[in-house]
Image (cartoon, grey):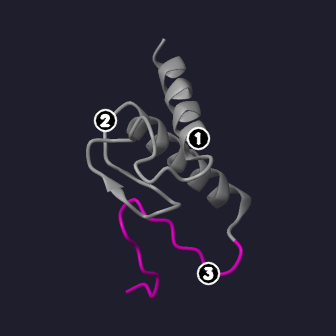
C-alpha cells in the first residue's frame, strides 16, 4: 500500500514540483480556463472566489479592477482556439 495520496485530476506535490509536474499543472489550468471561457464548464474567480456554474462571465459582477480585461482576453483566446 502506498503512502502517496492521489485525487483524480488533482496534482499533489511535496516541496517544489518538478518542471514536468509544473508544466502539466499549467496545461490543465489553461485548458480549464478556455473551456470555462467558452461556457463548457463552471468557473471560479481567483480574485473573489465566486462560482459561476454556467462558465466565465462576460464582465465582473463585482466590478473588480482589471477583471473585465482578463475575462475578455480569455474569451478571445478561447474563441481563437475554436477556429
Report the front residue among 71 and 20: 71
**Residue 36, located in which quarter of the rendered image?**
top left
| Magenta segment boundaries in residue numbering | 1-16
Q: Secondary structure at mark 3?
A: loop
Report the front residue among 9 and 71: 71
Q: Earlier in the sequence, mark 3 or mark 1?
A: 3
* Quarter in which the N terminus is drawn: bottom left
Q: Is residue 63 magenta?
A: no
- Which residue is denoted by mark 2 in the rendering? 40
Q: Position of residue 26 (x, y in %)?
A: 61, 50
Other-residue count near label 1 (Cα within 10 Å), few / some / many at <14 / 14–19 / ≥20: some
Mark pair 3, 1: CA separation: 31 Å
Q: Earlier in the sequence, mark 2 or mark 3?
A: 3
Q: Is residue 69 left or right of residue 6?
A: right
Q: Is residue 28 left or right of residue 2?
A: right
Q: Secondary structure at mark 2?
A: loop
> Pointer 2 and pointer 3: residues touching (CB < 8 Å)?
no
- Which residue is denoted by mark 1 in the rendering? 70
**Residue 54, located in which quarter of the rendered image?**
top left
Other-residue count near label 3 (Cα within 10 Å), few / some / many at <14 / 14–19 / ≥20: few
Q: Position of residue 31 (x, y in %)?
A: 49, 40
- Which residue is denoted by mark 3 in the rendering? 14
Amino acid at each position: 500500500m502506498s503512502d502517496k495520496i492521489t485525487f483524480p485530476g488533482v496534482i499533489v506535490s511535496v516541496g517544489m514540483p518538478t518542471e514536468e509536474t509544473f508544466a502539466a499543472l499549467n496545461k490543465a489550468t489553461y485548458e480549464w480556463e478556455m473551456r470555462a471561457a467558452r461556457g463548457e464548464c463552471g468557473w471560479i474567480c481567483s480574485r473573489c472566489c465566486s462560482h459561476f456554474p454556467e462558465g466565465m462571465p462576460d464582465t465582473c459582477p463585482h466590478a473588480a479592477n482589471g477583471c473585465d480585461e482578463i475575462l475578455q482576453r480569455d474569451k478571445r483566446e478561447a474563441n481563437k482556439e475554436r477556429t
